Image: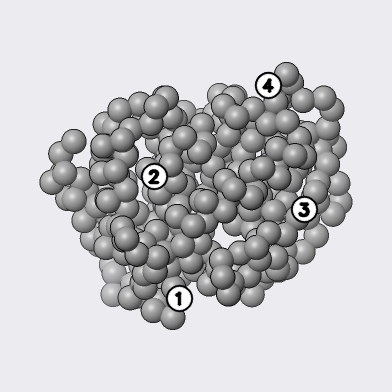
Amino acid sequence: MDRQRRHLSLGLLAAAGLLAIPGTAAARPDMTRTMGTTVADTGLAGYRFESRAFAGARGRRRHRVWLAIPEGTPPPVGFPALYLLDGNAVLSRLRPEWLTTLGTDTPPVLVMIGYDTDLLFDGDARHYDYTPAPRGQTSVRDARRPQREGGGAAAFIERIESAITPWVASRTQVDPNRKALWGHSFGGLFTLFTLCTRPQAFHLYLPVSPSLGWADNLLQQSLDHLAAQPPERNTPVWLCRGDNEVRITAEMDAEQLRQRKRQGNAAFNRFADDLDRISRVEVHRRLYSGLGHGDMFSAALPEALRIASGLTPEREWD
C-alpha cells in the first residue's frame, strides 16, 4: 500500500473541511434534547424490547443497551444482529415501517448501545468511548474541544465484546457470522477503528459520515495495522456520507462552497480506495445527494437495516 498516497488523502480530508471537524453547526447535535416516546414504549409488531444498564468507563455515565428481538423461533443458525452506536438517538428515530417492510424471514436483532440517560446524546461519554488514542496511550485531547477527553475506543471495544455481546447471546440466538456494527460521526470513526484493530469482532461494518480527521488523522495508524494484518475472511464495509458535508464559514462564497464540496467528496473517495486495497476488505461506498452531516444519521438507518438483513440496498452503491 502506498503510504504517501494515504497521507495525502487524509490531509485532503482535513483541508476540505469535512463534517469530521466537530464544532461546526452541521456537526453538533442538540445535547439538550431528550428521547421522548419511542417504539420500545409503544410496541412494534413482530418485535419485543428489553434493556439493561452496563458499567461505563471509570467516572463516566453507565451504558444503556436496548434490544429489539424478532418474535418467533430463531433460524437454526440464529438471527443476524445489528449493533448500533448512539443507541438513545437510534431508538428515538427508529420508525416501525423500516422494520415491518423488510419482508425477510431473518429480520435482524437490534442492539442499540447508548447511555443511561433520557438525553439523545451524552457528549462527554461518547467523545471518550468512540475515539481512539495514539498507540501506547489511553487518553487524547482534541484542540477544538480540550475540555473533553478522548481515547477510550480500545477499552470500549473490549467492554462490548466481554459484557454486551454475551448478554445479547443470553437473550436470543444470534448468528455469529452475521454481526454488523453501525456508527455515525465519532461512531463512524469507532466503527472503522474496530474494523482496523479487531476485524473479527463483526462480519460487516457500516460507518456513516466517519470523523476521519480525528486527532491529526490518527486513524492512519489503524489503517496501517489492518494492512499489515488483514482480516481472515472477506469483510464488507458499507461506507457513506452526504455530499453536502462541509465546514461552512461566514466568509465563504458560493464558489468556495462548491470547491469545498468537490474536495470533500474526492477525499472521501480516496479514503475508500485506500481501504479497498487492503486484502479481504470489500468496500461499498455511497454519497447521499444533498445531505449534510446531521441529516445522515437518520438517512442511513433504513439502508443499514436492509444490509444487515442480507437484502439488496434500495439504491445503488459503488
Quadrant in the picture for the N terminus: top left
| 92 to the left or right of 189 | right
Which type of secondary structure does the marked residue at label 1 adopt? strand
Residue 131 in the image, given as x and y percentages of width and height: 43, 60
Amino acid found under the numbered disc labelled 2: Thr
Q: Earlier in the sequence, mark 1 or mark 2?
A: 1
| 215 to the left or right of 89 | left
Q: Between residues 265 and 256, which one lies in front from this camera angle?
A: 265
Find disc 2 in the rendering and name its residue: 197
Image position of 159 with respect to 82: above or below = below
Instruction: Please give the name of the residue rendered at 43% of the width and 68% of the height, measured from the top-left corner.
Output: 150
Q: Residues within 10 Å of mark 4 (few under 14, many from 20)?
A: few
Q: Earlier in the sequence, mark 1 or mark 4?
A: 4
Find disc 3 in the rendering and name its residue: 51
Quadrant in the picture for the C terminus: top left
Amino acid found under the numbered disc labelled 3: Ser
Measure how far apart labels 1 and 3 are at the Cα level: 28 Å
Find disc 1 in the rendering and name its residue: 148
Measure how far apart labels 2 and 4 are at the Cα level: 27 Å
* Mark closer to the observer (1, 4): 4
Q: Earlier in the sequence, mark 3 or mark 4?
A: 3
Measure how far apart labels 3 and 2 are at the Cα level: 28 Å
Q: Earlier in the sequence, mark 3 or mark 2?
A: 3
Residue 280 in the image, given as x and y percentages of width and height: 35, 26
Which type of secondary structure does the marked residue at label 3 adopt? strand
Find disc 4 in the rendering and name its residue: 77
Q: Earlier in the sequence, mark 2 or mark 4?
A: 4
Measure how far apart labels 1 and 4 are at the Cα level: 42 Å
Instruction: Please give the name of the residue rendered at 59% of the width and 57% of the height, measured from the top-left corner.
Output: 86
Instruction: Please give the name of the residue rendered at 52% of the width and 51% of the height, measured from the top-left corner.
Output: 158
